[in-house]
Amino acid sequence: MTTTLKLSENIVNLRREKKITQEDLADFIGVTKAAVSKWETGQSLPDILILPQLAAYFDVTVDELLGYEAQLNREQIQKLYAGLAEDYARLPFEEVMEKTEGLVHRYYSCYPFLLQICTLWLNHFMLAKDQEQQQEVLGKGAKLCGHVMQNCREIAICNDAMTFKALFDLQMGKASEVVEQLEGMTDPSHIWRQTDSVLAQAYLAAGEGEKACSYTQISIYMHLLFLVGASTQYLGMNMKHLGICEQTIRRTEGILCLYNLDTLHPNSAAQFYYQAALVYMTHGKKEKALEKLGQYAQVVCFLLEEDHVCLHGDAYFDRLDEWIGKLELGAMPPRNMALVAKSVIQTLRHPLFGGLLDDEEFQRICKSIEKGVKRYE
């Protein structure tokens, strides 16, 4: 953690904002004008007992007066996140929440860290004992996002906070508010959506071909993940329309195969195969459902292997690893793998799979997944 104090500078700025002289301030505090002058030039510091009086006079907190800003670097954020994710897997939920809230208060001005707390809460709120407690966690997350949006000056972080807030609100059943908040901003016709292409062209024009290639490769990767995620959602929206679903499955599987996403990003692939299996069970097509569950099991077992948990590139996406290393959480997964393993077991207990319980192939699939999960028990 790095700490920066700006007491001298803040006293000068606050005094000028209040339009008072050093003598006025000295008279109010009960010190000499020379003492105030030394505070402002950094030659000496006010007595610790004077700080609350100064803060009250300027109508700020002591921390604001001092200019105290606790900041964490990327490595520290990653270490804290990994520890908290593990805590959620082994400690009582309430105990971990108390710990995370304490860290929020301690690093209330470290906005990149606060966003990772939002990630943590979104990925673990469902572990709360009941719906009331879940709603409480979601409400705290939405409020934290509001704090970041109001106080952070970095546009990218504010935009991320806005998206997180929308996710919290959606989970709280505030769909209309989310629509109102995002509808205009996400209009596909807006030209700002072409910024990826424009920036790549700018890199090229500036003679930075390597940056252009790296940026474009990352853009392709992110758009692929978006496409697969959107296709998975689309299946869920059209569960009753087998024709639409089968076209979506066929087209998306082509993308998965072409870009080796089963191994490049197994989490996205697994979610798609699972949703496809649910579609086929909805229409009583057990053989096709088992085929998709088999693909799901294969990808899940690959994911649960220790070396495949983290984000990574491959022979084609050979520039991803450097970029991933610069992400706030690096290559680490957003949830502890012990919790992921438990959730995978739960997916096999979906009511739609009730008609497969006596099927030998389904039993084989379950056993293969259980074998992969055992390493985390």
Image (cartoon, rainbow, N blue to C red):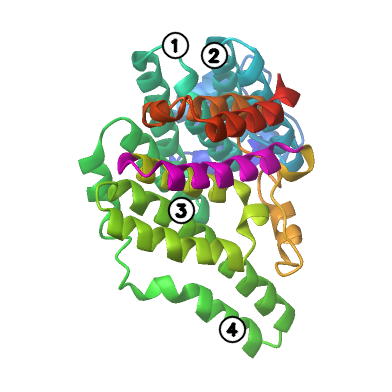
Quick one: label 3 or label 1, which is nearer the N terminus?
1
Q: Secondary structure at mark 3?
A: helix
148 w.r.t. 58: above or below: below
Pointer 1 residue: 129
Determine the CA span between mark 3 and mark 2. Answer: 29 Å
Q: Secondary structure at mark 1?
A: loop
Pointer 2 residue: 93
- Which residue: 64% across, 71% down? 217
Pointer 3 residue: 229
Report if residue 70 is visible in the image: yes
Q: Nearer the viewer, residue 250 or 163?
A: 250
Q: Secondary structure at mark 2?
A: helix
- Which residue: 52% across, 41% down? 293
Q: Which residues are magenta?
A: 282-305
Percent position of residue 207, x then y: 71, 88
Determine the CA span between mark 3 and mark 1. Answer: 29 Å
Quick one: label 2 or label 1, which is nearer the N terminus?
2
In magenta stretch: residue 48: no
